[in-house]
Image (cartoon, rainbow, N blue to C red):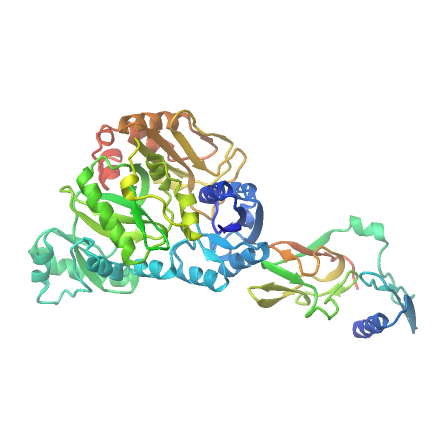
């Protein structure tokens, strides 16, 4: 086991890692920027090092400063959290060359899954279903275009290779619109990303975003855990996650779990990771991508399996073996997580950093709060707007929803605008309560056809 | 006497058993006493005007810190057998080398961002430093 872990992150996830390390008897080092001097993770750790000024490129992304901080404190491992340098292969490489353990997968695994087109090919080879689509870029002038499209099947979506965020995308429902759609998407991609390459994929209607947590040890054993349904999103940002999915049948769960395991085995994955799938209304599932880090929503899986994912992650990184199998895992009740952000839902989610005048965390049975907030703390403007993760667990989905609804009303964060009111609306919504959730849930049922 | 000559004098003092040395040269005097950290006192001469202010007046003056711009291990000289770049009493100018910070086996020069006289050294040789840590306190009000 490691002697001392430096946490290369901040806020709630840094607090989470410090807690896990403490339970394992490992010392902790917090790093922080000048504006984060009063952040909770700095107060919690055994030691702290200021590594730069506010801006992320000079602090939390400043590799020399972070490595230097590990050297002067004698840390033998670095936990990157999520975001920042968590999936940066160069950083993983630098840690290795400096003799510091990077608590995450080997850099080759990160690399293989980071390249989306290469990852697709790898998954196909591993027998993991991928969204049917073209192998590489396509041209509007290609005479075989209609044939290729027919093979994929309508409706399909033309997407930019180099981008995202909705640019360079066109949904095509029939052959007549095909050539024009490809040309338009290509043109848009060129002006938005400087690269006109586009490819085509089957368009999944009413998709659900369902992901599987996997764990891998250094001996090649991989275990999959029950899924998380993250279909409630706004602009591709997750707002609510839950486990298990209200939609998935036991049979498909096992098929997907096995597919997730194959995906992880294909890249010799060690420690924890998540395989994301898109699932259509017929329960056909398709590999979307793999996240090679601990995720924000990991607590929902912890609540329904009883497994401490961060402690497992540290143990696996230290070379320990997995002590359980997927078949040993029972789903215990139902868990839901709401991400409370410092954003104003009435002003198009404009971020509102500020000073927390009062903070009252909800409590009672089945309620867990993961947060770095305290009364008197000032939210800096340089970093993301996540204030707290509110997790509710119940013996079934109805109880989890009732507890979350109660907890959201107990939660008090004065001095800032937060998304808590939006989460209350979601919990009170009949469509949500019925479990009919897809990635278009928010615009359709909460924002009223925006 | 200039700084280089004074440094040479310090080196010679180290090589002997002498406890104290007083050197008079023209209008100025240099007095050296052997201790943990050699302290230079230049006796004011009539022509030079005010020299070093009395000790208690130092506390009332506004002192500007020289802060570390890096994380690493601080060294006060080029190598273990060399004298420190600067010590208390020295005058510094912006850009003047005041120390070395070692990070990831690379030595980087730390320079002063202010002009004035070093009043206090806050960091020990070989000790770790974080970003923004105060290394020296400088009295910038004194005019030369």
The quadrant of the image that shows the C terminus of chain A is top left
A267 on left or right of A436:
right
B32 or A102: which is nearer to us?
A102
Q: In this view, does B68 lie above or below A307?
A: below
- Say whether residue A446 is visible: yes
Within the image, what quadrant is residue B97 found in?
bottom right
- Quarter of the image for residue A296 reads top left
Identified at 48% across, 42% down, the residue is A15
Percent x, y for residue A225?
30, 43
Count of all numbered marks drawn on residues in the image? 0
| Horizontal and vertical percent position of residue B102 | 60, 64
Q: Can residue A228 be seen in this view?
A: no
Tell me which residue sits at (24%, 46%) in the image.
Answer: A257
B11 and A160: which is toward the camera: B11
Residue B52: give x, y in percent of width and height. 84, 59
What is the x, y in percent for residue A162?
28, 61
Tell me the residue at 79%/74% (across/down): B4
Left of A219 or right of it: where is A11? Answer: right
Q: In which quarter of the image is residue B1?
A: bottom right
């Amino acid at each position: 086991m490691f002697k001392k872990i430096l946490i290369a992150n901040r806020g709630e996830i840094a607090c989470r890692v410090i807690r896990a390390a403490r339970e394992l008897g490992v010392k902790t080092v917090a790093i922080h920027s000048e504006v984060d001097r009063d952040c909770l993770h700095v107060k919690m750790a055994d030691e702290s090092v200021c590594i730069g000024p506010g801006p992320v490129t000079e602090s939390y992304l400043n590799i020399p400063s972070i490595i230097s901080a590990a050297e002067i404190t004698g840390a033998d491992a670095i936990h990157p959290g999520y975001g920042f340098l968590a999936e940066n292969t160069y950083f993983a490489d630098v840690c290795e060359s400096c003799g510091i353990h990077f608590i995450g997968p080997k850099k080759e695994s990160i690399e293989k899954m980071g390249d989306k087109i290469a990852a697709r090919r790898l998954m196909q080879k591993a027998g993991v279903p991928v969204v049917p689509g073209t192998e590489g870029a396509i041209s509007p002038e290609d005479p075989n275009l209609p044939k290729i499209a027919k093979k994929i099947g309508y409706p399909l979506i033309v997407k930019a290779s180099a981008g995202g965020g909705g640019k360079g995308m066109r949904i095509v429902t029939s052959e007549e619109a095909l050539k024009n759609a490809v040309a338009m998407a290509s043109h848009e991609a060129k002006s938005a990303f400087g690269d006109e390459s586009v490819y085509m994929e089957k368009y999944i209607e009413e998709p659900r975003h369902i992901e599987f947590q996997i764990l891998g040890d250094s001996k090649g054993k991989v275990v999959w855990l029950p899924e998380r349904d993250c279909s409630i999103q706004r602009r591709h940002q997750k707002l609510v996650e839950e486990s298990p999915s209200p939609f998935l049948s036991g049979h498909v769960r096992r098929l997907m779990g096995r597919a997730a395991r194959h995906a992880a085995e294909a890249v010799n994955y060690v420690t924890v990771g998540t395989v994301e799938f898109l699932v259509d209304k017929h329960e056909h599932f398709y590999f979307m991508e793999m996240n090679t880090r601990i995720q924000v929503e990991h607590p929902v899986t912890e609540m329904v399996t009883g497994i401490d994912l961060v402690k497992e992650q540290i143990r696996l990184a230290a070379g320990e073996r997995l002590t359980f199998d997927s078949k040993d895992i029972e789903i215990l009740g139902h868990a839901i997580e709401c991400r409370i952000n410092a954003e104003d839902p009435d002003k198009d989610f404009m971020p509102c950093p500020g000073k927390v005048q009062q903070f009252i965390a909800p409590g009672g049975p089945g309620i867990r709060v993961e947060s770095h907030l305290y009364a008197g703390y000032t939210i800096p403007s340089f970093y993301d707007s996540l204030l707290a993760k509110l997790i509710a667990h119940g013996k079934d989905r109805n109880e989890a929803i009732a507890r979350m609804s109660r907890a959201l009303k107990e939660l008090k964060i004065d001095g800032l605008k937060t998304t808590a009111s939006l989460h209350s609306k979601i919990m009170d919504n009949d469509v949500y309560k019925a479990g009919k959730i897809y990635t278009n849930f928010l615009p359709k049922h909460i924002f009223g056809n925006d | 006497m200039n700084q280089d000559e004074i440094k040479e004098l310090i080196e010679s003092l180290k090589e002997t058993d002498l406890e104290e040395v007083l050197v008079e040269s023209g209008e100025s005097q240099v007095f050296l006493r052997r201790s943990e950290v050699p302290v230079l006192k230049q006796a004011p001469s009539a022509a030079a005007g005010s020299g070093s202010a009395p000790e208690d007046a130092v506390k009332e003056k506004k002192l500007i810190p020289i802060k570390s711009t890096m994380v690493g291990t601080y060294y006060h000289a080029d190598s273990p057998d060399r004298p420190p770049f600067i010590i208390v009493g020295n005058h510094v100018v912006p850009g003047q080398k005041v120390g070395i910070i070692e990070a990831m086996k690379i030595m980087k020069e730390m320079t002063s961002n202010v002009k004035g006289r070093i009043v206090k050294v806050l960091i020990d040789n070989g000790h770790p430093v974080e970003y923004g840590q105060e290394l020296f306190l400088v009295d910038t009000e004194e005019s030369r």
